[in-house]
Image: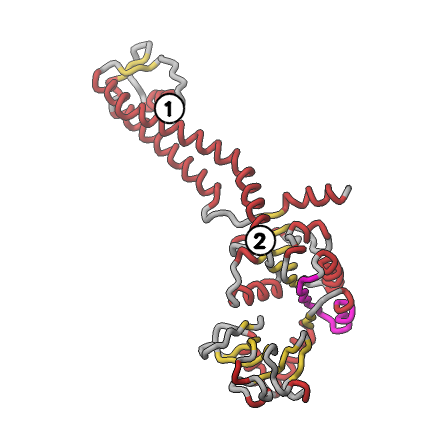
Amino acid sequence: MSRDGEVERARAWISVPRPRGGPGTAIARRLALAVLIMLGTVMVVYLDRDGYADNQGNPLSLLDAIYYATVSLSTTGYGDIAPITPSARLVNVLVLTPARVIFLIVLVGTTLEALTERSREAFRVGRWRRRVDQHVVVVGFGVKGRSAVRALLEDGMAREQIVVVDADPRALADAGRDGLTTVVGSGTRAAVLQEALAERARAVIVATNSDEANVLITLTARNLAPAAVISAAVREAENIPLLRRGGADQVVTSSDAAGRMLGLATRSPRIVDVFEDLLTSDVGLRLAERPAVEHEIGRGPRECADPVLAVVRDGRLLRFDDPAAAPIRARDRLITVRDVGGSTNEEVPVP
C-alpha cells in the first residue's frame, strides 16, 4: 500500500468528541415519540370506534384500531375503514391529521439523522484539523497516559488541545468520554501520528507499556516534529540512552522511580508523602517554573523567597548549588517549590 493510501485509511480512525447525547440519543428520542404517537392514535380511534365502519359493516376491534392507525399515520390509506360520523371525522381533522404530519416528520428526521452522521463527523474532523495547533499528542492511554492527561488538564490546558493515540478501542472510548480527540492506531506508524497532526504539536508524550514501542514512537515523532518537546516513559533505565538518541527531550523511568519510592517508604515514609504532594497540583505544594522577577535579579538562588531548586538559563539546567547559577539573570527561569494556595509570579506549573 502506498503512503497516500496509508494516510487515507488512517483518516477513518480519527474521532472528534461529539456533542453531548450524540445522534444515538436523538434517534432513540424520536423513535420513542413515534411510538407514543402511534399508541395515542390507536387509543383515540378505539375510544370512538362506533364512529368508524369497515367495508363489510363489522364493528371495530382493537386490532382494527391498530390497523387503521398504522395505515393512516403512514399515509397508506387503503380505505377499507373510514369515519362515518361527524364526531369521528372531526377527530380525524383535528387530531389524526396533525399526528400524521408529526409522525412523518419524526420518521424523515430519524432517517436524515442516520444518513448525515457520517457527513457531520467528517465536518467535525475537518474543522478540528483547521483549528488545532500547538497541541499535545499523548501516545498510550494506560495508567501513565491518563495521569499525563490529568496533569495537563490540571495545568489549565483545554481538552480540545489534547489528542490521544492508542491501538486499544476500549482505552480510546474512555478518552472520548472525557471529551478528548482520539486516533485509533499504533503510534509507531507515521501515518497514525500524522492523523494526530504531530507535525503541528508543541509536545508529544510517549507513554505506552513497551520500552521497544516507546523508542520507535520517539524516533517517528521526532522525524515528524523536529521542534516538538518529546517526553517519554521507560520501564528499564538501560533503555534511557536509546530514547535520548531517538530524540526524547525528557525520559522518565517508571520502574526505577517506583522502586526508589518503595525503598524510601520503608525507612522514611514522610519523604514519600512530600514527593506525592509535589506531584499533585491541586493541594499542598507543587513544583513550578516561572521567570525571575526584578527583585531576584543579581541575587543567588538561596536568597529568593521561594525555595529555588534549579535555574534554567539558555536552555541549560543549573542546580541551585551550581556556582554558575548565581547571580540570577534577567532572562533566567526558576524552578521553585510553591504553595498551591500562595501567590504566583506568572508561574507555569511543571506537570
> As shown in the figure, which amino acid type bears the numbered disc 1?
Leu
Q: Disc 2 on helix, strand or loop?
A: loop
Question: Where does the image place residue 252, in percent across and percent down from the top left?
Answer: 67, 71
Q: Which of marks 2 and 1 is nearer the N terminus?
A: 1
Between 245 and 127, the one lying in front of the other is 127
* Residue denoted by label 2: 132
- Disc 1, SS: helix
Residue type pointed to by label 2: Val
Residue 229 location, quadrant: bottom right
Q: Mark 1 points at which residue?
A: 73
Question: The C terminus lies in which quarter of the figure?
Answer: bottom right
Is 237 a magenta residue? yes
Task: Pinpoint residue 178: horizontal percent, then vertical percent.
Answer: 52, 56
Camera-nearest residue between 275 and 288: 288
Q: How crowded is mark 1: few (under 14 residues within 10 Å), some or many (20 or more)?
A: many
In percent of width and height, residue 280 lies at 53, 73
Image location (x, y in percent) of residue 287: 56, 77
Q: Can residue 51 be seen in this view?
A: yes
Identify whether 116 is placed above or below 235.
Answer: above
**Was residue 113 drawn as part of the magenta stretch in this picture?**
no
In this image, 125 relative to 37: left or right? right
Residue projecting furthest to the left = 86
Which residue lies at the image location 55% right of the left edge and 65% below the top edge?
Answer: 152
Q: What stretch is highlighted in magenta?
A: 227-243
Front position among marks 2 and 1: 2
Res 66 quadrant in image: top left
Q: How many residues crowd mark 2 within 10 Å: few (<14), some (14–19), many (20+)?
A: some
